[in-house]
Image (cartoon, rainbow, N blue to C red):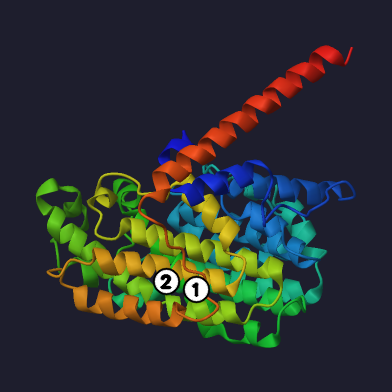
Amino acid sequence: MDIWKSITHPDEIVALFKYQLGWNAVAPKQDTTNMSATAKRCYDYLNQTSRSFAAVIQALDGDLRHAVCIFYLVLRALDTVEDDMTIPMDEKTDLLVQFYTKLEDPEWTYNKSQEKDKMVLEDFTCISKEYRGLASEYRVVISEICQKMGKGMCEFIQRDVITMEDWNLYCHYVAGLVGIGLSRLFSASDLEDKIVGEDTDLANSMGLFLQKTNIIRDYLEDNVEGREFWPKETWSKYADKLSDFQKHSNIRPAVSCLNDLITNALHHVPDVLKYMSRIKNQSVFNFCAIPQVMAIATLAACYNNHNVFSGVVKIRKGQAVSLILKATSMGSIKGIMYQFASQIQEATPKIDPSADQTLKITSSIVSLSTTENSTVTTQNSFYPLYGSVTIMTAMILYTYWNSIAALYSLYTSG
């Protein structure tokens, strides 16, 4: 049960309680009652294919909401082609390179995919119709990003990630371009200043931070499925083969490599803070902030953690909900970055090969996050357990009272 995992973290129990009561900064604003049939199907596909982005997309303001929804579904369809190992290589490369042209074809669909999200290809006529109904300033962004991403994906399905430069380039193609495209959509909507869409370096860095976090966390899943996204330039310093990290006898070099890559990923955090400082619209701020704070929390959970090589390391649901509720202001973002950078600092082993670099970048993040407006959470050592018990008791009583009230209403309504 999620609540028991947060028993010593009262802020998380409060967050879970608030979430259950509907205190959610990213509650969907989309009203589907007056939507066309194709638009409704698009939001159905969004909810089916996205675990993390569906809610924040639907909480965006104005017509930006629909533009980002369609952008997401177009890229989800493209990504489904890339992931499908049953598509012959020649056919796949042609599909990836030409995919952006399908946006203008009202009849095009693809019915040979075996991937779990194949519905976005099988009903691509629905998605492309909604795309063609968008304002021209949105369409040009989506088409250009789709074209560049398809070309980049085509490049990396035919070669490995060898150097750190390769790693950055691969992450640019699959995530940095998403950050650039979203930023251009934000500016096109007039909800954000032009500089947000024009500063492609910062937008790219936002995407790289998220993608590197996913690649680091997903080591075992990718390795079992025969995919290698950790750069050879780094892992070859610690092992002869990337798969060697699964062996218990290699756990120390495996963790050293893990810490090395996490240290690299943390170098994007200063860019994240600068990017977020420019965002003015609250719905856009929430949309951008939530994945970023989840990423640094995930890196902190993975840092120096041998469990990355034997399972999936995840942050607690209570912790995730707490971050969602907190990440609504620049002060809160800085406080969260401070918290997890400090956590990594404290966990850095002195003998770790990349310890000096880790301490340097975490110190930089702590410094950037320490301002009069930052909100840093501190807790009394005696408070967590007793505070959690008190809050849990209140929640149990609340649930009990609601059950009694419902039962009373049932038997008195007649």
Amino acid at dot 2: Tyr
The structure residue drawn at horizontal position 72% and vertical position 56%, both measured from the top left corner, is 58
For disc 1, the marked residue is 334
Q: From the viewer's perspective, is 5 left or right of 233?
A: right
Q: How many numbered marks are there?
A: 2
Tell me if residue 155 can be seen: no
For disc 2, the marked residue is 338
The percent position of residue 13, horizontal first and vertical second, equals 51, 44
The percent position of residue 74, horizontal first and vertical second, equals 64, 60
Could you tell me if the residues under marks 2 and 1 are in contact, i.e. CB atoms within 8 Å? yes
Secondary structure at badge 1 equals: helix
Q: From the viewer's perspective, is 279 left or right of 342?
A: right
Q: Nearer the viewer, residue 153 or 98?
A: 153
Q: Nearer the viewer, residue 139 or 219?
A: 219
Q: From the viewer's perspective, is 230 left or right of 183?
A: left
Q: Residue furthest left?
A: 249
Disc 2/disc 1 C-alpha distance (Å): 6 Å
Where the C terminus falls, by quadrant? Answer: top right
The structure residue drawn at horizontal position 12% and vertical position 53%, both measured from the top left corner, is 250
The structure residue drawn at horizontal position 85% and vertical position 14%, both measured from the top left corner, is 412
Amino acid at dot 1: Lys
Q: Is residue 353 above or below residue 325?
A: below
The percent position of residue 326, horizontal first and vertical second, equals 57, 61
Tell me if residue 287 can be seen: yes
Q: Nearer the viewer, residue 180 or 93?
A: 180
